Amino acid sequence: MATKILPPSDSAYQYPLLIKQLLHSSQRFENNNPIVSGPHRFSYAQFNERVCRLANALKAAGIGPGDTVAVMDWDSHRYLECFFAIPMIGAILHTVNIRLSPGQILYTMNHAEDDLVLVHDDFVPIIDGIKDQLETVKGFIRLSDESQSPSSEFPTLGEYEALLAQADVHYDFPDFDENSVATTFYTTGTTGNPKGVYFSHRQLVLHTLNMVNMLQSRSSEGALLNHDGVYMPITPMFHVHAWGIPYAATMMGVKQVYPGRYIPDELTRLIREEGVTFSHCVPTILQMVLQSSEAPDTDFRGWTVIIGGSALTSGLAKAAMERGIQPYSAYGMSETCPLLAITRMGKEEHALAEEDQIGWRIKAGLPSDLVDIQIWNPEGEVLPHDGKSTGELVTRSPWLTQSYLNEPEKGDELWQGGWLHTGDIACIHPDGSVEIKDRIKDVIKTGGEWISSLELESLISKHAGVSAVTVVGVPDERWGERPFALVVPNCEDLETESLIEHLQQFVDDGTINKWAIPKEFKLVDDIPKTSVGKIDKKLIRAQIS
Amino acid sequence: MATKILPPSDSAYQYPLLIKQLLHSSQRFENNNPIVSGPHRFSYAQFNERVCRLANALKAAGIGPGDTVAVMDWDSHRYLECFFAIPMIGAILHTVNIRLSPGQILYTMNHAEDDLVLVHDDFVPIIDGIKDQLETVKGFIRLSDESQSPSSEFPTLGEYEALLAQADVHYDFPDFDENSVATTFYTTGTTGNPKGVYFSHRQLVLHTLNMVNMLQSRSSEGALLNHDGVYMPITPMFHVHAWGIPYAATMMGVKQVYPGRYIPDELTRLIREEGVTFSHCVPTILQMVLQSSEAPDTDFRGWTVIIGGSALTSGLAKAAMERGIQPYSAYGMSETCPLLAITRMGKEEHALAEEDQIGWRIKAGLPSDLVDIQIWNPEGEVLPHDGKSTGELVTRSPWLTQSYLNEPEKGDELWQGGWLHTGDIACIHPDGSVEIKDRIKDVIKTGGEWISSLELESLISKHAGVSAVTVVGVPDERWGERPFALVVPNCEDLETESLIEHLQQFVDDGTINKWAIPKEFKLVDDIPKTSVGKIDKKLIRAQIS
């Protein structure tokens, strides 16, 4: 393409998209909104100073451009400072998934070639156990919430707050290539070792601009988050940068609340006392907040929550709305930074009757701006957006991991045909909304038909006696597979017959076929979850067989 | 900087920032909002089809990547289609300033090396007059609002609608380098020929993402524009792409109204009948709308207007607010795409008393996200943000023209020291807000002091008998310069003594010094304007001397 590209003036500034610009945007005006974390309340001006101090402390610890710094912490002001200071000096932030097994954590730290580790007191025992096998780590910084840190078996450069107190408050953050890697973290698949994804400054800046747009869009009935709002993440900051929303919230200069370790009563108290207006989490956490002992005394009206990670069920959406909460859905994955789609509510959607509104809210939402989404059949043909054709959701956007860290062959598989393969089965409705039917590997193949385990879960969850449910496919001699349901009842007398009767009405009205009624219902106290709080269907299938 | 840059997977899609993505974002969901222009009402789906048809028509006319297509039209659906189709095929859109003299228009068309010209019936006489001197133009397409076009002295390829009707509705818009030039247009300085500025796809996409954020930000009392809003530009589309807001509005998928040639009664009727909620214009146009004969019968409540180009005076802000209009200010220039700063109103600002709120609204606003602004003294030293220190406003952002078209030496001057020089004198307040004091060339140097002509105009405009005012410096033997005021009275008995008495109170309270009282007040019917509606101080100074 012989388009015209003109040379800039020799003195023109070539503006790179760098994370420092996100921070500076909120520094350009006086801002009374605090950043709250435990006993701390920092102004944005103080926060900016602390980011400079951290940069100087990292430099003093020998960290420079291209080095990797691992962080093991609960959601805190420190973590937010690391989100900025580490990439801003040209280094790479490795957000360690502290819910992995020590062996997996060791694997990720060696694989990412971490140079320095910032470790919270609570995770010192993990490091004590693996320290002799860490291949690249040259030092440790302790993160303490108490004045007296428990002892460790490894030497450290000091405690975070003490190091910051000694450091200079000025740091001249340099410009560099916007394609420099800013962050990395690991995603656990069904088999093999965790895989590393990575994102550049350019990708994170574009994701943030887009996230801010999405948080504010279709807002005649109020934005999800605006400058007057109060933000508290309840998706761990090690999990896809808490969906990248701390970057968005910081650019917007809003009040932010970091809740530390997630304790349902404490989360509920923070929502009430700090006036939180906006959060995001997996369904389980919302359920835990609603069932916390603080919940009955808490007015949840004015709290908006985006649900992701697992699908929002209509049952949970209804329960949330009954408490005055505005539930939304968002869709994405570690590989996608993560935002691909999000519920948008305008005048028309807010005017819908409750049942229809819940139907809109529990879909995966509308594709975000700048996100291309297609549905492919197994032959790689593009399927129509008719709300019926289902296939794998593939995508392109400016913020997708460009491969897996040091595993190019897995990266090629992810990007087969020039589109990122999500591994999700979905359909797209004529109105553009995306409906995730299942993970490819969780689809139940029965009698020549595909049954969506998610759809079945949603239908079962509508039964008044069901608190939580998950469905997996189990081998069946005659039909190939049949559904098997794990149900957490919310009463003592829930019977299988009642569940079958409940599902029969959906067979009768054509929503599902008769093979979709599970072969077996098992009543349980709890559903097994993965380290990031998702339902662990792999484990469930293993336990059943 | 040895940051880490990792190679992407061979099959990973390298997502370029291209204008087509802005259009596709609003195509991803069903959209009932129309694009209104004269008798036409197009859905977004139809609009998308028309953009494809136009691309095919351009191709049939021999236009390809790197070619330049000039447009001479009033604000119409056609112009919006050109905003997309021309850059999307890799060509360059030249938005011709139809208010320039025919000689200047000829200069810009030759200088931009236009290949094809789309010309509205009303501008055919201009082309008739210059056609023999056009050096690069190979063809013309006529734009007609009537079924029968008046004749021209030059051959044309046909009429726009007829060409679109013949063209195919499919076009596979290619990917190319995001740094390709997308648009160009000319800015008239005080001396010499018009200068060409130019913007790349990357710059326009980033400007649009930022514009959408700004239109939606600080919106607890309602965004400037959201998905449920109705947009009508009243800044010509040839003037810095109507501030780039048609791109933002299209990405947001809102209802858009294109008013054709600006006729105050017609604008007012459209605001009323189409339910327009958001516009932007120069002060003069807002004044014309408020004074139109349709105005008394029009309910302006719910109409938000950004004022730019010239400063919003407190008098006009007050008059607008009395009619229920929400006036805002924005600041930028042709070289800056244009957005640099914009009024933002949150909870706190909306709670201000009227006088203070007007004070907030008439400032140039807060710097936009990703915009760096500094104030330099003549020695190039950075001045503090204390609300007092004044100097030249210099800036960096991702959407600034990187030079002047084919005039690198002028580009170097613009970018002296790696910052774009606006030629505006400003101060920055501790709260981050920008206050433009004057154009460097309009500052009045008297008795060793600098007097801001804008500040003086604002103070004089507060006099109840003043409808409009402009102040220039005139030579003065004793003081170097003295202010000279042109005043449009709104009553028959306005006297100079009353104006002097009015200003004396601001001398007494220390707002201005006594040299700031103009040497002479001249009562006039009208104030001379430039082609884009700005006050023509150059002409005024020439007429006085």
Image: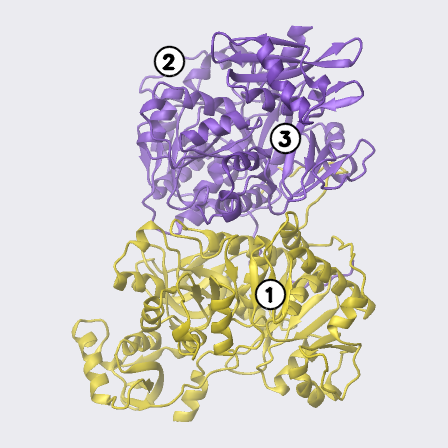
Chain colours: A purple, B yellow
Q: Amino acid at mark 3?
A: Val
Q: Secondary structure at mark 3?
A: strand
- Quadrant of the rendering where the C terminus of chain B is positioned: bottom left
| Residues at circles 1 and 3 in contact by the CB criterion of under 8 Å | no
Q: Secondary structure at mark 1?
A: strand
Q: Amino acid at mark 1?
A: Val
Q: Depth check: A503 or B295 in front?
A: A503
Location of residue A458 in the rendering, given as x and y in whole percent from the top left corner: 59, 24
Residue drawn at x 43%, y 80% as measured from the top left = B293
Q: Amino acid at mark 2?
A: Pro
| Chain under callout 3 | A
Tell which circle, 3 or 2, labels the residue nearer the N-terminal end.
2
| Disc sitting over residue A150 in the figure | 2
Location of residue B41 in the rendering, given as x and y in whole percent from the top left corner: 63, 64
* Disc 2 and disc 1 on one polypeptide chain: no
Location of residue A201 in the rendering, given as x and y in whole percent from the top left corner: 57, 42
Q: Nearer the viewer, mark 1 or mark 3?
A: 1
Q: Depth check: B320 or B534 in front?
A: B320
Q: CA distance from mark 3 to mark 2?
A: 33 Å
Write down the residue under mark 1: B36
Farthest left residue? B508
Write down the residue under mark 3: A197
Q: Nearer the viewer, mark 3 or mark 2?
A: 3
Tell me the quarter of the picture where residue A42 sits.
top left
Q: For this view, does A17 lie left or right of residue A38?
A: right
| Chain under callout 2 | A
Vertical side of B350 occupied by A359: above or below: above
Q: CA distance from mark 2 to mark 1?
A: 69 Å
Residue drawn at x 67%, y 27% as measured from the top left = A509
Location of residue B31 in the rendering, given as x and y in whole percent from the top left corner: 61, 52
- Neighbours of disc 2 within 10 Å: few (<14), some (14-19), many (20+): few
